[in-house]
Every structure is written in C-alpha cells, then in structure tokens.
Image: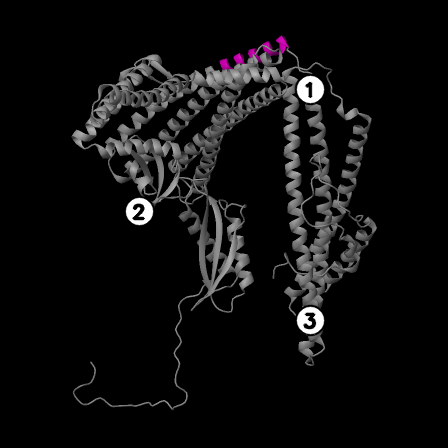
Amino acid sequence: MKITARPARLLPILLLLTFFCFGSPAQGENGTPEKKSLQEPPPEELIMSKVDDLQKRIKSFADSENEDIAKALNVTVEQLKERTEILQETLAYYNQQLQALRKHDSLLQEKQALQDRIATGEALKLEESPPYSLKFYDDFNVRLAENQRNLETALLAVSVSERALRDAKDRFKEAGVKIRQLKSDSAQLKDHQAVLQNQWLLEQAERDEGLAGGVTGYQELALTNAREEAELAAIRANLNSQVRERIRENLHFDPADLDKQLAAIDEQKRELQERSDAIRKNLRQANREVDKVQKKVERAQGENEINKVKATLDVAEQWRQTYRIQLEQVENIIQQLSTRKQLWKQRYDLIKGAIERKEFTALKEGAVKQRDRLQQSLALEQERQTSLQLQIGKLEEQLRQEGLSWDAKGNLNEQRNALVGLVNSTINFITALNHTNQMNLRFIDELESARRSLSLAEMVSVTIARLQGWWKAELFVIDDQPLTLGTITTSLVILILGIILTGFVSRLLQKRLLVRLNISASSAAIAGKLVHYIILILVVLFAMRIVNIPLTAFTFFGGAIAIGVGFGAQKLINNFISCFIIMAEQPIRVGDLIMMDNEQCWIEDIGARCTKVRTYSNINILVPNSYFLENNITNWTHSDNIVRGKVTVGVAYGSPTRTVKEELLKAAAEHGEVRKHPEPYVFFGDFGDNALVFELYYWVTVTQSVGIQRISSDLRFMVDERLRDAGITIAFPQRDLHFDSGKPLQIELSRAKPGKEKE
C-alpha cells in the first residue's frame, strides 16, 4: 500500500495554519508582488509538541509490531508496519515545518535589513564613484540579470506552492468524507469481525488525516516562504534597476578601459588561432586515419574481421566529425571576437558623441539583424547539445551490456570520448554566443536610450535622413545602372502625367480636325488614336531616359513572353513566379513540417522551379512550386513547432476511471519531450461496446529528429506499463451469447450409422 498522496483531514491544531489566499501574487506598480492579508505562522512550540507526541506514538507502534497484536486487531503484521510508516512520514513533514519556520524568520530578517539599507540610502551606494566605465556597467548588468532570473524562479516557486497547497486541501476534504462514512457505517455493524475491521479502517483514516495535516501545514509554510522570497527578489531587482540607470547616466569615455578590452580580445583571438591550428592538424590526421581504415575494410575477409574493422572505422569517422565541428566553432568564435571588438568601439563612440544622430537607425537595424543571427545560432547549438547528450547516453547504455569484448568496449569508449569532447566544445561555443549576444543587446538598449534623448530638431533631422536613405536605396541593377526607389517613383510620376497629357492632347486634336479640316468623325478618331499612342510611346521613352532606365530592362520580360509563346514554357514561368509568391506570403518555409499525399514531409529548400521536401523515410521529393499555391497543404509548423498529439486507450468496464486518468497524465508527465505548457489532459471519450474509451491529448515540439509518431508510440508503451502496474485491464472485444430462458433447451443424442463413423 502506498503512503504518498493519501487523503486526510487536518487536525484541530493545524487549522491555525490556513492563512493564505490562493492565486498568483498580485503585481504592484513597481513589479513587486503585493502582500496579501495573512495570519501569523503557528508558534514553533505547537509544532514541537506535535513532534514529541508523534515520536512517542511511533515508538509505541514499533514495539507492537508482532503476530499477537496483529491477531488481536484482525490485521497483518505488514499493516502494523504500514501504520508506523505513516506516522514516520507525518513526523518528517512536521520536521520540515520546523525548518520552514526557521527559514521564514531568516527571510523576514533579511528583508528587514534590506529595507533598512534602502531607507538609509546605503543600498544605492556603489563601490566606485562616478563617472563609470563600460566594463563596470557591463559587470553590473550581469548582476542585474542574475537578480531577474532569481525573481522569475521565485515567482515560479510561488505558483508551484499554491498548486501543491490546493492539492493538499483537496485531499483533506476527501479524507473528511471517508471518516464520516466509516463512522456512519460503524453504527450499523453487528458482527464482531466486521466491527474490528471497521475500527481498524477508521483508525487508519485518522492516521491519514494526520499525515495530510502535516503535508498541508508544510505546504502553507512553503507558500509563505516562496512569497517572501519573491518579494525579496523583486525588491532587489527594482533596486538594481535604479542603480543601473544611475550608472548609465554617469558613463564616460575611458580610453584606458577601451584599450584594455581590445587588447584582451586580441589576446583571446591569438589563443583561439593557435587552437584552430591544432584542431586543423588533428583533422588532417583524422582524415588520413579514415582513409587508412577504409582501405582495411576493402581488404578485410570474413564476417568477424569485417565487423571489427568497421567498428574501428566508426571511431575514426566520429573523431573526424568532432574535429570538423570543433574547427567550425572555433573559427566562428574568432569572428565573434571581431564583432565584440567593433561593439566596444561603437559603444564608446556613442558615449563620447562620435556617432551622428542620423546613423542611429542604421546601427540599430544592423544590431537587430546581428541579434537574430546570434539567437538562431544559439538555438541550433542547443539542439546539437541535446542530440549529443542522447548519443552519449546510448553509448553508455551499450557499454553496460554484458558480453562485450575488450575491443568493442574500447571502440565504444573512444566514440564516447569524441562526443564528450564535442559536448565541451559546444558548451564553450554557446557561452561565446551568449557573451556576444549580451553585448549586442546592451548596444541596442544604449542606442534606444540615446534616441529617446534626442531633441525635436534632431528627431526631425534623423527622420529626414532616414527618408533620404530610403529614397536613394538601391533596389536592383540592370546593365550597371542602379534602380532606386527615387528613380522608380520619378518615372512613375512622369508616366502618369504623360498618360493624362496624351489623353488631353488626343481629344483636343480630334476636335480641331473635325472643325478645321472637315473630315469624318471616324477618320478624326483614328488620327486621335494614332497621335495618342505615338505621344504615349514618346512619354515612356522620355521617362526612361530621364531616370536612366535602359531599354534592356524589358529584355527579360520580352524573352520570357517569346519563350512562353514559342515553346510552351507557361509552366516554367508559372513555377518561377510561384517561387516569389511563396517567398512573399510564406505559406511554407524551410524547416516546416507539412502533410502531403497523406505523408509527413519537411521542407528542405525552396528553389526557383521546385521545392525539395524530405520524408521521415529519408526520401527526397521534388515538388513544383505551383503545387503549393493550387492545392490544399496542411502546414503543421506554420506559426510554431508545437503540435498536439493523441493517444486513445480502452479499459475494461468496472475500472477506476479517475485512476486511469491519473495514470495517463503521469505517463505524459514522465515523458521528457511532452511539453508542460500547454498541459496534457484526458477526455473520457465514450462508453464503448467493449471498453471505457479514454483519450490523452498532449503537446510536443516537433523537429526533424522528434516526430509525433515516435512520441505517441513511447506514450503507448508507458501507458501499457502503468495500467498493468495499477491492475487495470486494457479491454479487448467481447461477445455475449444469450439463450431464450422461456423454453427448455432441447438436447439430442444420435448414434452414427455403421460405415459412416468418423475417422
């Protein structure tokens, strides 16, 4: 019998512990959780007296764990031991309450000390006097980021504690119902054995209520401490934000600090270059080793020898892959050092006012693009890190298998060492990416702060400069002639005015011809049309000449039309134009998971004529671009990679439905790739013909390595195991035969005729 998650009722003394309101802590104006009206925690003496009482009862119960007592109570010795275990677990929760009370006192003292330092102004003091360097500012930003993480962790702890307290109180209510039911049943029992059994169950329920009381009391104290920690973290974060603004207002250009940072970057770049040369040397040696082993594979004879050499080849390939990736990472870090060097210079130029106001926008746009690239690289490296950990775990599992030869173990260890080296290198690379990203984010923040400090005249100047930049922005080039937004706009204005003018001139000419030359209306109309088209052509040529648009700009379109008419290239042009439509509207993107012809595929590349997709069977399919615009396509990852999965299971009638739901949710919670948010949930789907049908819905983040089918399969294995352990039967089709009981059954016995006996 399990002891955890046992319904119980709160003892009268523990009713003093219910001093919290449920729900997330409200946020004040400064982002700190507002204090709720809470009662004082219970005195330590009350809990100590409960601990002493429990210790005495535990000793008494432990001494009575024998066959005689068990027979007298009509129970087993195991049930007596379980009784003692329940009290021991209850005692553990009361001891945790004592620790939580002491922690509460410590948090109150810490918060009071911090508030006193804030009141006296000592908390706002810094170890250095203004002005401050960028290095000092960056170091303080690291401290502030740590405070923000602590605040987020504390708020999450508050949410978890509130949920745990709600669960404990729910168990308390259920325990009360059970105790009242047992007491009600005891008045109706007359059999001695039944009375003893009911009395034992009642005492067991009362012990359970003591356990639930300890759990509830501890959860209430844990919630109090979590809220105090969240408030303390919010005060610190708010305080450090004020100090950071004060440091930012007193930043100054420090040439010595800039030279020191640049020199440190140059030294780090030199060390990385030496490391890059060493890795490149190891990579050349690994390439030679792979070529050498491949030749051995070709010369190997016999299955054992071939398998042995192939295992050696796997090791050599793994080391070559490790060195190749490490070299790419080190060279990328060297490039990042150049970016950091430029960021240091730009940040100090911003402080001393060496950057013109009109350059703020361009600098910020470049920094934002750099931020996006860094974040994409971080996401890729984190995915690689996860994949490497899985590979290492698989190798370690193979190493634990019995019966492996020394050579096999050696090869597996070598592969593991190569992967471990790559893991360490990836960690360093992720650290470098984070460092560069943090510097870039600070530069964006500083640019935004400087932009907000601009005067009205400076803002107008910056806006004009931005518009001029857009006006002169080069869109594309034809025959070494740049086409800008300004030239295209000018040509359009000339063309529109020319069209209006040609219409006016052609109508005026047509009226004058009718009046002065006395020609027919049809002739005047023909002449007006001719003049209209001639003037229109001249206007178009004049507009193209004014803005320096060469006639070759229309060569491609004319050629496309000629090819389409002459050789039937309509589909080619259709797919080509569809490529641009797909890129503009983005109904599909590279990396999206789509459903095509009842098969899941990943978009790998969008080309000019066709799109390359890859199935989970590792088969490439080339699909014309127009197919995606002319057919219904199911895109599973259009907005994000979160996809809902479903597992259906049927259990036998009479199974405990609530237990089935809990086991399904536990299976989903134990799977490492099932998302916690949104939370999985279970539907009692239907009363089926042969089973009670349950549906488990869950969400996962799908990637090319993580598919919904694999996770569904894992969950089915886990659900089958958990239901079997819980004694719940997964149903199978059943058929019942019904006889007409209103008439007697007729049974006939016949003897086989001679010569027709069955052989």
Question: Is 103 above or below relative to 567?
Answer: below
- Quadrant in the picture for residue 237: top right
Q: Which residue is mark 1?
A: 247
- Quadrant in the picture for residue 740: bottom left
Instruction: Please tell me which of labels 1 and 2 falls first in the chain.
Output: 1
User: Looking at the magenta stretch, what is its main secondary structure?
Assistant: helix
Characterize the local packing of mark 3: few (<14), some (14-19) or many (20 or more) Cα atoms within 10 angstroms. Answer: some
Proximity of marks 1 and 3: CB atoms separated by less than 8 Å: no
Question: In the depicted view, which residue is nearer to us: 160 or 526?
Answer: 526
- Quadrant in the picture for residue 206: bottom right
Q: Secondary structure at mark 2?
A: loop
Question: In the depicted view, which residue is nearer to us: 380 or 448?
Answer: 448
x%, y% of residue 674? 49, 46
Query: Disc 2 to disc 3, how far (Cα)?
Result: 61 Å
x%, y% of residue 227? 71, 42
Characterize the local packing of mark 1: few (<14), some (14-19) or many (20 or more) Cα atoms within 10 angstroms. Answer: many
Q: Is residue 240 visible?
A: yes
Q: Nearer the viewer, mark 2 or mark 3?
A: 2
* Highlighted range, magenta: 254-270
x%, y% of residue 314? 35, 33
Q: Which residue is mark 2?
A: 597
Characterize the local packing of mark 2: few (<14), some (14-19) or many (20 or more) Cα atoms within 10 angstroms. Answer: few
Q: Which quadrant is the N terminus positioned in?
A: bottom right
Tell whether 254 sits left or right of 489.
Answer: right
Tell whether 673 sits left or right of 113.
Answer: left
